[in-house]
Image (cartoon, rainbow, N blue to C red):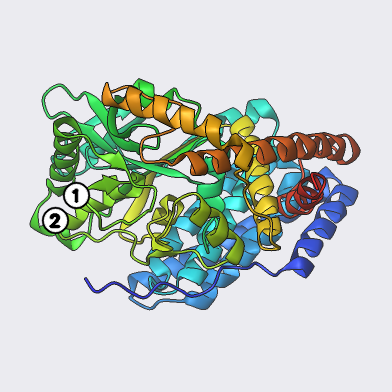
């Protein structure tokens, strides 16, 4: 398949007036009271669902209605403040938003990444604002969101297993987000900022149904872990993706995903593959996380990341370049969510982890805002001898298959810059967290993403 050109320039919402309107709508809903607001929400939900059904019927007739999709997206956005004000109808709202996201994958133009991102990422933000606003006990019902039917409902024959309450097939992809500053930087540091920083490939044994996860770690390159180990390392969120049932490659070979996973597992067990800090996805000698998924699928004729990821902002390129990245058209983990060859299977998140995710995003967004204005990651000369010793010690440990303080393939200078990022991130996050607590005391709610970003700009400015 011919690869479309990546879109040029970074995405900007540029909707300050719309965000102000949402703030005003929230205040109006609060003033109107629970009964009146819930009646309005019920009416709007019914109208939106009717519009969604009409759009899907048109699609069934092969008449694509992009304008209706955009209108539906705006309706979901507009309903958000009322549901945040009184989350009684949150389950119906969340169901509608997810149905619109699913419909967008059918109706959207695969070549128009900006429109697709606006819908899929925008509705993700709307859903998460509601999840964060819900009473904690009520939010627990949505910690695992299943998007697809169990595998026994199809004739795929691909080995499957239950992972954390959800059927997962061999060849599925797991997008995730860690809690480290570098995880937030990877998730946000592209032209289409997202919520995921890592991707791994699932292998399910055909006989034992044992689940293995193949992934590339910064510290040790490609490695294999069991499902409990993968799930238990402090991830903030996980999204499972699967090749569409109607994908042309599956029409030729239903077992292709399992063959992909088997090939990846075999490579991980047979040779040491170092981590690719340069993010050159076509280099087979080293691999970063996205390559673990892309390479074996690409070898079998499935070119994932339908539109390549790009990084064009000066600050992003400066920071990532100083950390060893030298390919700014690549495969960002978060962008896999917008590949229309895939469908979501399930998602795991908690209210607490979503709050942390949003705060981490805001901190990095604020730091990158400063990077665009000239802030550099530092590697002070007086720390070079200490970093050199740490690198030499790590090199020695690597020779014996162990992990040192400086990852294999990372220079001592880059390690110092990573350390500087961690310090700046930690200080700014501490300040932003205090600001968030003050906002919650004053407003009685967690700040929305646009307020978080403005608060973050103040937090990161304070370390001058």
Residue 195, position as x, y percentages in the image: 53, 48
- The image quadrant of residue 141 is top right
Report whether 192 appears left or right of 34. Answer: left
Which residue shows up at 45% across the image and 63% down it? Answer: 104
Which residue shows up at 34% across the image and 69% down it? Answer: 60
Q: Give the camera-side residue of 156 and 369.
A: 369
Q: Which residue is mark 1?
A: 296
Residue 53, position as x, y percentages in the image: 47, 64
Q: Which mark is residue 212?
A: none
In this view, 74 is above or below 415: below
Which residue shows up at 51% across the image and 38% down it? Answer: 415
**In the rendered view of the protein, which quadrant contains the N terminus?**
bottom left
Q: Is residue 47 visible?
A: no
Residue 265, position as x, y percentages in the image: 18, 35
Q: Give the camera-side residue of 43 and 158.
A: 158
Asked if the residue at tag 1 contacts the one at tag 2, i.e. Cβ–Cβ closer than 8 Å, the answer is yes
Q: Secondary structure at mark 1?
A: helix
- Disc 2 from disc 1: Cα separation: 7 Å
Q: Residues within 10 Å of mark 2 (few under 14, many from 20)?
A: few
- Labels in figure, total: 2
In this view, 395 is above or below 115: above
Q: Residues within 10 Å of mark 1 (few under 14, many from 20)?
A: many
Report whether 191 appears left or right of 132. Answer: left
Residue 244, position as x, y percentages in the image: 27, 55
Q: Is residue 352 visible?
A: yes
Q: Which residue is mark 2?
A: 300
Report whether 304 appears left or right of 104. Answer: left
Q: Secondary structure at mark 2?
A: loop
């Amino acid at each position: 398949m011919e690869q479309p050109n990546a879109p040029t320039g970074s995405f900007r919402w540029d909707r300050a007036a719309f965000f102000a309107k949402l703030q005003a709508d929230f205040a109006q809903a609060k003033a109107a009271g629970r009964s009146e607001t819930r009646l309005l929400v019920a009416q709007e939900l019914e109208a939106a669902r009717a519009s969604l059904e009409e759009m899907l019927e048109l699609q069934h007739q092969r008449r694509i209605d992009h304008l209706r999709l955009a209108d539906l997206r705006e309706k979901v956005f507009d309903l958000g403040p009322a549901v945040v004000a009184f989350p009684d109808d949150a389950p119906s709202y969340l169901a509608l938003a997810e149905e619109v996201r699913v419909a967008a994958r059918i109706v959207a133009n695969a070549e128009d990444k900006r429109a697709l991102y606006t819908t899929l990422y925008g509705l993700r933000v709307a859903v998460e604002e509601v999840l964060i606003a819900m009473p904690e006990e009520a939010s627990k019902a949505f910690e695992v969101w299943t998007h697809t039917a169990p595998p026994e409902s199809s004739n795929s024959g691909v080995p499957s297993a239950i992972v954390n309450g959800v059927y997962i097939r061999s060849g599925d992809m797991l997008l995730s987000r860690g809690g480290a500053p570098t995880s937030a930087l990877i998730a946000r540091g592209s032209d289409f900022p997202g919520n995921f920083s890592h991707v791994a490939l699932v292998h399910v044994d055909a006989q034992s149904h044992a689940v293995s996860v193949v992934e590339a770690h910064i510290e040790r390159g490609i490695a294999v872990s069991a499902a409990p180990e993968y799930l238990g390392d402090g991830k903030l969120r996980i999204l499972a993706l699967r090749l569409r049932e109607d994908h042309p490659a599956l029409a030729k070979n239903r077992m292709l995903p399992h063959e992909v996973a088997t090939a990846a597992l075999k490579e991980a067990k047979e040779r040491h593959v170092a981590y690719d800090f340069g993010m050159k996805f076509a280099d087979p000698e080293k691999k970063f996380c996205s390559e673990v998924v892309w390479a074996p699928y690409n070898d079998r004729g499935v070119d994932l990341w339908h539109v390549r990821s790009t990084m064009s902002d000066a600050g992003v390129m400066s920071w990532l370049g100083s950390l060893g990245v030298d390919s700014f058209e690549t495969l960002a983990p978060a962008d896999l969510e917008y590949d229309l060859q895939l469908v979501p299977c399930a998602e795991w998140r908690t209210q607490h982890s979503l709050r942390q995710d949003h705060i981490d995003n805001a901190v990095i967004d604020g730091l990158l805002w400063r990077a665009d204005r000239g802030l550099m990651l530092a590697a002070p000369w007086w720390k070079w001898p200490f970093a050199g010793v740490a690198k030499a010690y790590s090199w020695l440990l690597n020779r014996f298959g162990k992990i040192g303080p400086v990852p294999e393939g990372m220079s001592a200078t880059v390690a110092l810059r990573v350390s500087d990022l961690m310090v700046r991130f930690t200080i700014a996050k501490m300040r932003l967290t205090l600001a968030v607590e003050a906002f919650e005391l004053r407003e009685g709610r967690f700040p929305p993403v646009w307020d978080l970003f403005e608060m973050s700009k103040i937090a990161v400015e304070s370390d001058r």
